[in-house]
Image (cartoon, helix red, strand yellow):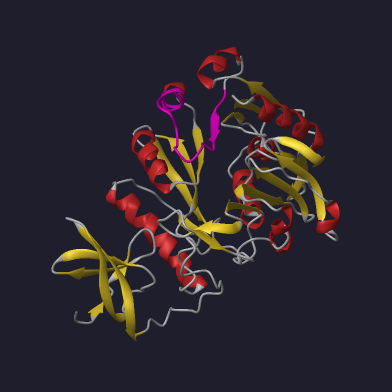
Amino acid sequence: MEDIKIEKLDNFGRGICYFNNKITFIKNALPDEIISYKIIKENKKYNLAEVTEYKKYSEKRTKPFCPYYLKCGGCNLEHLDYKSTLEFKLNKVKQILDKEKIIYDNIEIVSNEVPKNYRNKLSLKVKDYLIGFYEEGTHNIIEVKNCSIAYNSINEVLKRIKYLNIKNGNVTIRSNYNDEILLIIDTNDKIKFNIALFSNLKIVGVIVNKKVIYGQNFFYESINGYLFKVSFDAFFQVNQFITSKLFNIIEENIDESNTILDLYSGVGTLGIVASKKAKKVYSIEIVKNAVLDNITNKKLNKKDNIYPILGDAKKVITKIKDKFDTILIDPPRKGLDSLSKNLILNNDVSKIIYISCDLMTLVRDLKELTKKYKIIKYYVLDMFSYTYHVECVCVMTRR
């Protein structure tokens, strides 16, 4: 095949070119690069291809810092210099918003000062004693001995997982601000944990099939002076450095007069941050253990203006006698369910602060919410550096 020029990147960080007038996606190729390539998969509407030779490199290309980068499916942008990854993410968000005719102002990118070794959680697969991640697009295990975007404390644990003699299963390693470790294992194999194998590491808990076999099932995380109890299976942001900036954004967009409804509140993280300035915060969560953690976190942070409530939002909201004027939402990746969306629209609040880790479901929800609300601030947070994923914060006021 003739050499071809890469025109741009798609939303997943793949290079785009055209072969016989059909759009063709090529991994590890950058705009303005000239390459030789081969087609590896043909579909009616598109092709997948791979580079066979680079004839001209992009000035923005950089050498990947992870030895597993070309096989592991975790990161997508390590061949691009960090500043350019931010430009890619900001332009990606703008293009999708513009395509869906969503009007916005004051959009800005929030960078990560620690774009390597930033992850405080690592989820690993174990298959026939191999420990690692799935190869992109397959269930083949790529064995890894170090993850370049995970905490150093996590990588020290990763080096010693083999001593547990797990044949098949899943292993999750979580670490906090103090390099304390929760080791979570799901397997049918018998595990005999010997703390001596993890000497000089701060193992505070080992949980096998949801049962504690060593230590405890939680640790504490500290960010911006706040302290949070985090259970082994509780959600917490994976990037402490960007979460610090997220907290600042929440505080900046809360007024002292606000009475806030915190939906999908989990262990109360964002509600507790909002309560620093807000008049009152009502945090609604359907998972009992998360509400119990919220109560603990409320006490840890000495907040007496936050009220954790267990239950389904649409059912318990009628029990709140106060009139709330602000809704704070951080839903799961699937976004808002229809009932929550109707709840928000029907209560006609003055302000909505929507935090999302999935751009497409956020855009889907914004198409409906912006019928009654206008976007006054939009933040693109580099929560997941060197991947195509973004964390977004959207601040809206009633029209």
- Image x and y of residue 225, in percent: 77, 48
Q: In the image, is 230 to the left or to the right of 376?
A: right
- Against 22, is 235 above or below? above
- Image x and y of residue 7, in percent: 27, 72
- Judged from this view, the residue extending furthest toward the bottom is 55
- Against 134, is 347 above or below? above
Q: Nearer the viewer, residue 225 or 48?
A: 48
Q: Nearer the viewer, residue 50 or 178?
A: 50
Q: Residue drawn at (50%, 34%), measured in percent from left and top?
A: 351
- Against 93, is 288 above or below? above
Q: Residue drawn at (50%, 69%), measured in percent from left and top?
A: 69
Q: Nearer the viewer, residue 176 or 247?
A: 176
Q: In the image, is 272 to the left or to the right of 9?
A: right
Q: Which stretch appears magenta?
A: 324-345
327 drawn magenta: yes
Q: Nearer the viewer, residue 295 or 214?
A: 214
Labels in figure, total: 0
Quadrant the N terminus occupies: bottom left
Quadrant the C terminus occupies: top left
Q: Residue drawn at (74%, 52%), measured in percent from left and top?
A: 176
Q: Answer with the quarter of the image where residue 294 lies.
A: top right
